[in-house]
Image (spheres, helix red, strand yellow):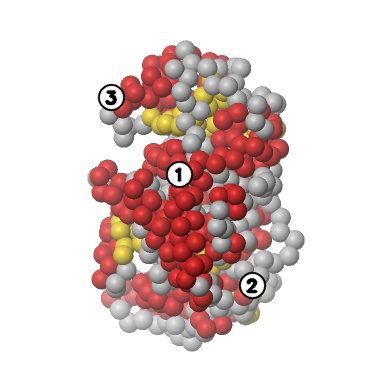
């Protein structure tokens, strides 16, 4: 009987487990339940795939991401692991074929969407099979307090009564304490082992910038730092996704849209292009989970604020899954805050949930306006601690200036009060700057004592001040659809002069040249090694096309770089390369050895 380490080494091609992986695998092999919180790219899949191979029967993997199922099954197939999936993308005949394999005990893992799993016909089928375990992926979806709640996940709690003998493992990369507790309660994991593996992704550099011609900012970022790299650009609306993808294409980038309004065929084609080709940018709605598993995404850009820190952290987690340097860049403006607050307040959810959504948005706004290390606040939000500043976020690299904004805040707050707390940011700024427009005269606001008292600041500077006043909760936004500002109790001591208010200065104009720039992987390869690097990538691409899978499923970049360093010339030496298991050695080994031997001969 092989051990877990044998499977890791000979099937997956890794010499040792990372972090808590071994303890999680051991717990499942012993029949215990487990809750696993592990950052994206931390190796969650191995935690259930290894015991699924070792335990008798089939492991049922519940996932809401149809595209990811195909990706996972393709990867396992290339490793020689028997796996399949069932979801709405399959025909009736294809589903029957999977069911026959299931009943004949021919599968180690079956990936299935929750709505399909919970059909009575599926449950009756599983009762006729030998099951090894249930793995609930993206387990935060089970929580009504989570950022990505899926109603179909609620009914998963009934699986424990139906299959009481099977161990359950719930896995997620993003869940605060309240969400974790609901996962435990709903999936009845109270007696299981809980593995909180930390949330830090130190290879991701977090940057947040106020919007100032966001397209121009995006173009500068792509041209100066990300030429030749793959990445994701998130937008708040489908229309903006389409417009941004079209505009990027006009600028010479290979950019494709991806949102829920596209046909299944277009979404599948665009996603496959992104997964299988280099230098592709996918533009997507923040509300739509893509389910991508591409390891070499070098950047994630948010053109608009997401709804919460949880959503932001999950979406930025798509970058740098291979462990190499990546950038998460967000542009935001006060119009984003107004729009998201309106969306939260006008939703059909109950008042308790609306209040939670407002709290989450306020927490994200606080992250945006932060003076200190962003990573420390992010991790603290998930009850994780980073003792020292990270040194790899924009605030650590270029510490922002702060200034005594007490007088400016008093002017802003007074103007909100004098205008009757009935107007939005743009009108208040017009009054402060002494505008002579129709709206100001319509309400006779040119006669107010606050008219024209803020001419020393530009409109953009006032927007920065107002964003921070909202973030500090001195001002609140009426969420009934108009973005109206009104004072809170916290504004009183500032207005009375009892409290000094320090705000963040505008850092938009700082020289980009002083920022740490992330280079493409290819920039780190010695010139003498470049011919072999290109030859290895060409070999990988050819094999990927032959097998109909993305190139990284053949071997990821880290494995190719290991080949570049060690230059193995026989199967024994190639087997020592990280990521080369027995099946891949048999399937692809000789092709890569031929490339290396030829390069060595030509040196």
Q: Is residue 149 visible?
A: no
Q: Which residue is mark 2?
A: 396
Q: Earlier in the sequence, mark 2 or mark 3?
A: 3
Q: Which residue is mark 3?
A: 93
Q: Viewed as shown, does residue 589 lie left or right of 54? A: left
Tell me if label 2 and label 3 are in contact, CB under 8 Å: no
Q: Position of residue 478 (x, y in %)?
A: 44, 56
Q: Earlier in the sequence, mark 2 or mark 1?
A: 2
Q: Position of residue 267 (x, y in %)?
A: 30, 48
Q: Is residue 208 above or below residue 400?
A: above
Q: Is residue 484 above or below residue 409?
A: above
Q: Which mark is residue 293?
A: none
Q: Which residue is mark 1?
A: 587
Q: Name which residue lies at 56% across and 35% down.
A: 49
Q: Earlier in the sequence, mark 1 or mark 3?
A: 3
Q: Nearer the viewer, mark 2 or mark 3?
A: 3
State the separation of the CA atoms marked 2 and 3: 56 Å
| Number of other residues with Cα within 10 Å of mark 2, as a class: few under 14, some 14 to 19, many 20 or more | some
Q: Position of residue 195 (x, y in %)?
A: 68, 40
Q: Name which residue lies at 45% across and 41% down.
A: 78
Of helix, strand and loop, which one carries label 3?
helix
Q: Which quadrant, please, contains the N terminus?
A: top right
Q: Name which residue lies at 43% across and 25% down.
A: 117
């Amino acid at each position: 009987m092989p051990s877990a380490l044998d499977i890791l080494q000979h099937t997956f091609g890794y010499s040792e487990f990372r972090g808590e992986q071994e303890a999680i695998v051991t717990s499942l092999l012993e029949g215990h339940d487990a809750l696993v919180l592990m950052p994206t790219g931390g190796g969650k899949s191995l935690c259930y795939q290894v015991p699924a191979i070792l335990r008798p029967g089939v492991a049922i993997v519940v996932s809401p991401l149809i595209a990811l199922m195909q990706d996972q099954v393709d990867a396992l197939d290339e490793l020689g692991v028997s796996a399949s999936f069932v979801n709405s993308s399959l025909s009736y005949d294809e589903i029957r074929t999977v069911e026959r394999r299931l009943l004949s005990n021919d599968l180690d893992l079956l990936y299935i969407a929750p709505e399909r799993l919970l059909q009575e016909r599926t449950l009756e089928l599983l009762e006729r099979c030998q099951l090894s375990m249930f793995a609930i992926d993206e387990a935060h979806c089970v929580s009504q307090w989570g950022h990505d709640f899926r109603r179909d996940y609620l009914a998963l709690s009934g699986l424990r009564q139906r299959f009481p003998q099977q161990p359950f493992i719930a896995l997620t990369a993003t869940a605060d304490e309240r969400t974790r507790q609901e996962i435990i309660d709903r999936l009845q994991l109270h007696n299981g082992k809980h593995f909180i593996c930390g949330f830090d992704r130190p290879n991701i550099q977090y940057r947040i910038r106020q919007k100032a011609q966001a397209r121009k900012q995006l173009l500068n970022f792509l041209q100066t730092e990300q030429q030749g790299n793959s990445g994701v650009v998130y937008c708040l609306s489908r229309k903006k996704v389409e417009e941004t993808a079209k505009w990027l294409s006009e600028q010479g980038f290979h950019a494709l849209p991806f949102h829920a309004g596209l046909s299944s065929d277009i979404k599948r084609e665009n996603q496959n292009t992104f997964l299988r080709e280099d230098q592709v940018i996918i533009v997507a709605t923040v509300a739509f989970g893509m389910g991508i598993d591409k390891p070499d995404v070098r950047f994630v850009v948010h053109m608009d604020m997401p709804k919460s820190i949880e959503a932001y952290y999950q979406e930025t987690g798509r970058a740098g899954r291979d462990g190499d340097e990546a950038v998460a860049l967000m542009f935001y403006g006060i119009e984003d805050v107004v729009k998201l607050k309106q969306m939260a307040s006008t939703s059909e959810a109950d008042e308790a949930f609306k209040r939670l959504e407002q709290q989450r948005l306020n927490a994200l706004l606080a992250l945006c306006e932060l003076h200190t290390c962003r990573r420390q606040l992010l991790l603290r939000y998930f009850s994780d601690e980073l003792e020292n500043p990270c040194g790899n976020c924009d605030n650590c690299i270029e510490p922002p200036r702060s200034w005594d904004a007490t007088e400016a805040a008093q002017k802003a707050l007074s103007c909100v009060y004098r205008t009757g707390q009935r107007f939005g940011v743009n009108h208040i700024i017009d009054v402060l700057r002494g505008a002579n427009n129709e709206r100001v005269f319509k309400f006779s606001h040119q006669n107010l004592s606050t008219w024209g008292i803020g001419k020393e600041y530009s409109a953009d500077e006032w927007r920065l001040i107002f964003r921070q006043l909202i973030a500090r909760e001195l001002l609140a936004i009426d969420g009934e659809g108009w973005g109206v500002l009104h004072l809170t109790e916290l504004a009183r001591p500032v207005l009375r002069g009892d409290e000094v208010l320090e705000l963040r200065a505008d850092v938009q104009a700082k020289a980009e040249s002083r920022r740490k720039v992330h280079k493409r992987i290819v920039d780190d390869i010695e010139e003498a090694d470049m011919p072999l690097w290109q030859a290895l990538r060409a070999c990988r691409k050819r094999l990927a096309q032959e097998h109909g899978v993305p190139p990284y499923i053949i071997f990821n970049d880290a494995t190719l770089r290991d080949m570049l360093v060690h230059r193995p010339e026989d199967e024994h030496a190639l087997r020592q390369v990280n990521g080369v298991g027995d099946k891949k050695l048999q399937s692809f080994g000789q092709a890569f050895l031929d490339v290396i031997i030829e390069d060595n001969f030509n040196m």
